Amino acid sequence: MAVETTTPVTPVWNDPAQDIDTRVTALIEAMTVEEKIAQLFGVWVGASAEGGEVAPHQHDMEEAVDLDALLPAGLGQLTRPFGTAPVDPALGALSLLRTQRRIMSANRFGIPALAHEECLAGFAAWGATAYPVPLSWGATFDPELIRRMAAAIGEDMRRVGIHQGLAPVLDVVRDARWGRVEETIGEDPYLVGTIGTAYVQGLESAGIVATLKHFAGYSASRAGRNLAPVSMGSRERADVLLPPFEMALREGGARSVMHAYTDTDGIPSAADEELLTGLLRDTWGFTGTVVADYFGIAFLKILHGVAGDFTEAAALALRAGVDVELPSVKTFGADLVQAVTDGTVPEELVDRALRRVLAQKAELGLLDADFDPVPPALKDADTDDGADTDALRGTVDLDSPGNRELAARAADESVILLRNNGALPLSAPRRIALIGPQADEPTAVLGCYSFPLHVGVHHPEVPVGIALPTLREALVREFPGVEIVTVRGADVDTDDTSGFDEAVRVARDADVVVVALGDRAGLFGRGTSGEGCDAESLALPGVQQALLDRLLDTGTPLVVTLLAGRPYALGRATAGADAIVASFFPGAEGTAAVARVLSGAVNPSGRLPVSVPAGSGGQPATYLAARLAGRSDVSAIDPTPAFAFGHGLSYTTFDWSDLVVAAEEAATDGEFTLSFTVRNTGDRHGAEVVQLYLHDPVASVVQPVQRLIGYRRVPLAPGEARRLTVTVPADVASFTGRDGRRVVEPGELELRLSAASDAPRLTASVRLTGPARHVDHTRRLHAEFR
């Protein structure tokens, strides 16, 4: 007798042959309210150092999490499995894999969690390459390099099972006292947008979901204080804060956005329906997920006072357009399930967020019937229970030679020569006095979101995991045979001056002094730069300025090197030092890059992404300012910077000439074409950074004196010339008019081809003609160089 066999039917949601909307709709219809909401939150976990399942991480904002109770309903995200405690990358991947298997087997739909990590300056995992911080990305003015760097970061994350990266930060610097300046790309929205978009493109090319943060206005907080209220007007928000997000979504393809902590004019971002739904989705057409900044939904009750309890906070966030609560379940828990069940909170809000979350999981392949949670790094490994986990230890390299090469290139291009009276490059000195708190400090090159300072500092018993050569070690390698005498002289942030006398004595006996000053990155007051480490002024921390002044008094040639997270006023050294070299936390290869610039092995090509102030007060001030913000006879405060946005010197010289404007008039829907020649007139290879600024002398609303609308790095051999052509669409002259709409107005304009915001080389006077023309988010965004 024949036995009938039946072929198992693949549920619609597991069938990749179906379109995503059909799959997601079927899955939502099959889920209970509890199962739906379970997909909308994460759990903060730490991978096991032995390769076992992850363990929930506890924080003072969280209640204890019982995974056994949660997992039968499913789980939306796993928070920072690698970035919570030091763990060998291979064993961390195994721990994550085993946890995913547990999650999939526990819920009736077999849905895995989406795992996210920080990647602000490299994958925030033990043993992973520490790249330069974003402020250094901005200093490179090199989007293609940042794209390659981000692709390498994304590939490392994907190899060990991570799906989403919480970067880049697209906040535009408005006040350099803010502690998170190191995490930003600069003070100009076009620079932030182009460099940030390149990072997004690199991360997404590796299959990692890029998360834009912090949407929107976080960096405009009062007095530069972290998480303080924001009082900017709608025009500043539209013309300064929003364009980088607009560009990164439209041209980068970012699939996630993180709301900001702050409130703007009384409306918290996490509860701002006009921002998160009206603008982001209805106008810009964003279809990805909006995730909460950590504990941001709970802050609607705790800090903002717009919700009476956590369930009300959850409802406000869902209605505004937040889809996922991070880092752990606090407001999207059992009370929300009950509120939806009894109709207090509309189930439609949950379904709307759930649809976006499940669509993203489907795009990542997490809903496919044949989804295999084994990450690429473990494809050939024995991952079954009882396997020899020690054999895996050390088999995954997150700090490869290729990574280091990219980190070195990014560091080289980010170092900025601010001043040089001929002292650099150093010419065979007999004795170098290396003085200062950053002289022999391995972590002087790292930002607050680097793993060693973000996590490793809490585990002093664990090795750092990557090589971090100090500036002393880098100089010893760069200057073989030269005597290098190293004295600390002072700490980064204490008032101790007891080391000054020894520093002065050593300086007087040297041929040249290299003074190494700057910041110590940390979190919430544990550093002088970083999240929660805001500054009262832009004076160098501690007694570093006093040390610098004492060294200037010795008369020995003096080179200032800065390893910092923000720009600082340098007092007398601005004009009195023989050379000044600035670097913003340039990563693991950073000290070698600084040493190569000092020796001349590298010709510096970095440019300032933020202005360097002449004085420590008078903040906030950026180059992107209206006429009234400049020096005047009616104020005792002169905000003119010591070194302007875009400034940076070279060891060679460049000549700009032969400007030709194809037509000096264009319609408000037209474009201008300019061509000119840049020539290297020096005796060594170098890269000039051509910057194009727009000056609009008369407009219907107040405009900044000038703003960046395009740039191009131009590498040139000695004597080499290059003819450049730039097309400038009228759209880039648009701004938010009196009626709140973006407009291109007719009238006179100046197009300034400049080496820095205060160094125009060639200027074209042009005119827009015809009627005023309104444009939207589909406008042309770039002045195109070729």
Image (tube, rainbow, N blue to C red):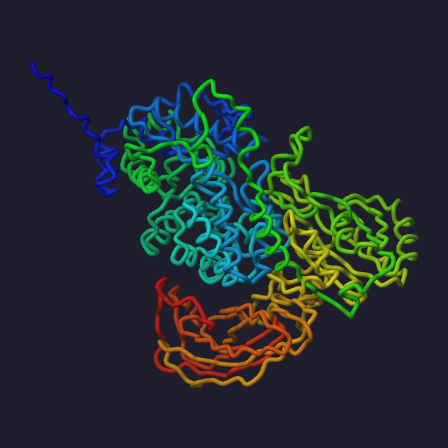
Q: Nearer the viewer, residue 63 or 760?
A: 760
Q: Residue furthest top?
A: 1
Image height check: is 173 above or below 112? Answer: below
Residue at 44 percent of width and 29 percent of height: 97
Quarter holding the N terminus is top left
Image label count: 0
Please state the horizontal and vertical placement of residue 129, each as a whole percent of the image: 59, 44
Q: Is residue 389 left or right of residue 68?
A: right
**In this rendering, does residue 309 appear at all?**
no
Image-based side of 602 in relation to 180, left or right: right
* x and y, in percent, of residue 150 in the image: 50, 50
Residue 243, image x, y percentages: 45, 60
Report which quarter residue 345 is drawn in.
Answer: top left
Q: Residue furthest left?
A: 1
Residue 666, relative to residue 404: is it above or below? below
* Foreground residue among 658 and 395: 395
The residue under the point 38% across, 29% down is 75
Q: Is residue 274 visible?
A: yes
Q: Residue at x 35, y 76 (%)?
A: 669
Please identify the quarter of the rendering in which residue 685 is found: bottom right
Q: For this view, does 777 lie left or right of residue 558?
A: left
Q: Nearer the viewer, residue 37 or 81?
A: 81
x and y percentages locating residue 252 in the rendered image:
41, 55
